[in-house]
Image: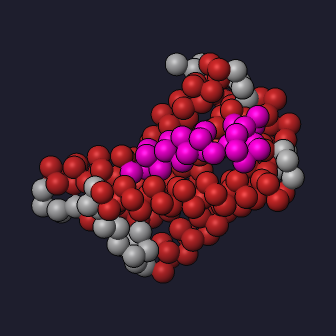
Amino acid sequence: MLSADETQASLIGAWRLMLGKADGLRLLDLSADGFWNSFFAIVVAAPALIVGWVGLANEIGDPDAFAGRFSTLLRLATVDIGSWVLPLIVLALVAPRAGVGGRFVHYVVASNWASAITAWLMLPSALIKLFVSSSSQVSSLVSLFLFALSMVLTWRMTNATIGKGAAIGTAVFVGMFIVSLAVLFGLQMLLGITVPDGA
């Protein structure tokens, strides 16, 4: 388990990368241990993610059956964690052929910590959905704004981390986004989850 100082340094480094500052890489541990330790970011993100899972589980699960909602929550967790990890496995297979193999570790470490930041960035949207229907205009606007902001920050992180110019950085960003969506929808279908419009 990482110390609080190591976690803080990693989050600061990722945030600097999300602002487009490549010097954020100097705050990240890019060793083999650092690579695996970066998945601790899932634990860091978990409280924020759980809020979102609870809100969705309450909305799409059986409101009168705790077991039904809990089962839905576990399936939502599986979808989110799968959508976090599986695209990185795909990148591991593709990166050497795409000419970014040398930046694979950099990207995974930075992406993991940036994803933790993004999870907390999306927390206001998840909190609103706990009290307001996801179909409400306010909820939809907040979700859309935070999603757009997270995409911009993730693009900047990708570009700064790959370090091979905006064209290649953008190609990696778009590719990872498409794979993430494919995994997300695939897991939702596989696990029988139907998310309401606007959720």
Image location of residue 23, percent across then percent down: 86, 36
Which residue of the protein is positioned furthest toward the front in this rendering? Answer: 97
Q: Give the residue drawn at x 12%, y 56%.
A: 65
Q: Give the residue drawn at x 64%, y 38%.
A: 108
Near-viewer residue (96 or 25): 96
Image location of residue 166, percent across then percent down: 84, 57
Image location of residue 125, percent across then percent down: 50, 62
Is residue 178 left or right of 109 when viewed as pictured? left
Q: Is residue 186 visible?
A: yes
Is residue 43 left or right of 9 when viewed as pictured? left
Q: Is residue 46 above or below residue 9?
A: below
Which residue of the protein is positioned furthest toward the left in this rendering? Answer: 64
Q: Give the residue drawn at x 73%, y 58%.
A: 171
Q: Which residues are magenta?
A: 79-104
Near-viewer residue (38 or 16): 38
Which residue of the protein is positioned furthest toward the bottom in this rendering? Answer: 137
Q: Main secondary structure of the magenta part?
A: helix
